[in-house]
Amino acid sequence: MDGVKDTKTGPVRLSKMNDLVPGYPRAMMFGAFPAMIPNNVSEVTEVLLLAHLLYQHKVPL
């Protein structure tokens, strides 16, 4: 078994995110990630924000 694939980062396992999106970046699996998203490049901002929101959607309340 691949140890990295089963790594748990916060409330959602990396393997779960990789099941949804192969190669999902672990760096996006933190609540502080949106603060690093540039807001002056609209096409980049939207893609990164949507990708992070996918993770947020999987975080249990």
Image (spheres, rainbow, N blue to C red):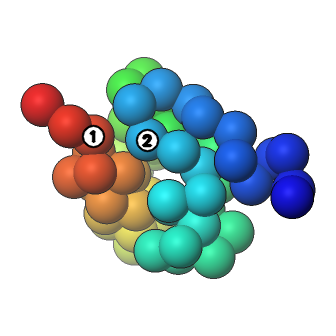
* Quadrant assignment, res 2: bottom right
Tag shown at residue 12: 2
For the question of whether residue 33 can be seen, the reply is: no
SS at badge 1:
loop
What is the tally of numbered marks visible in this picture?
2
Tag shown at residue 2: none
Looking at the image, residue 40 lies above or below residue 27 = below
Q: Earlier in the sequence, mark 2 or mark 1?
A: 2
Label 1 neighbourhood size at 10 Å, few (<14), some (14-19), many (20+)? few
Question: What amino acid type is highlighted by mark number 2?
Answer: Val
* Quadrant assignment, res 43: bottom left
With 43 as the anchor, is 59 left or right in this view? left
User: Are the two marked residues, 2 and 1, in contact with CB atoms closer than 8 angstroms?
Assistant: yes
With 43 as the anchor, is 24 left or right in this view? right
Task: Report the residue at 31% width, 60% height from top.
Answer: 54
Residue 10 point in image, percent of width and height:
47, 26
Residues at marks 2 and 1, CA–CA distance in whole angstroms: 6 Å
Residue 37 point in image, percent of width and height:
45, 42
Task: Report the residue at 43% width, 41% height from top.
Answer: 12
Task: Report the residue at 70% width, 47% height from top.
Answer: 6
Residue 55 point in image, percent of width and height:
36, 51
Label 2 neighbourhood size at 10 Å, few (<14), some (14-19), many (20+)? some
Residue 14 point in image, percent of width and height:
59, 50
Looking at the image, residue 52 lies above or below residue 22 = above
Q: Which residue is mark 1?
A: 59
Question: What amino acid type is highlighted by mark number 1?
Answer: Val
With 24 as the anchor, is 49 left or right in this view? left
For the question of whether residue 5 can be seen, the reply is: yes
Task: Report the residue at 40% width, 31% height from top.
Answer: 11
Q: Quadrant of the C terminus?
A: top left
In this view, the residue farthest toward the right is 2
SS at badge 2:
strand
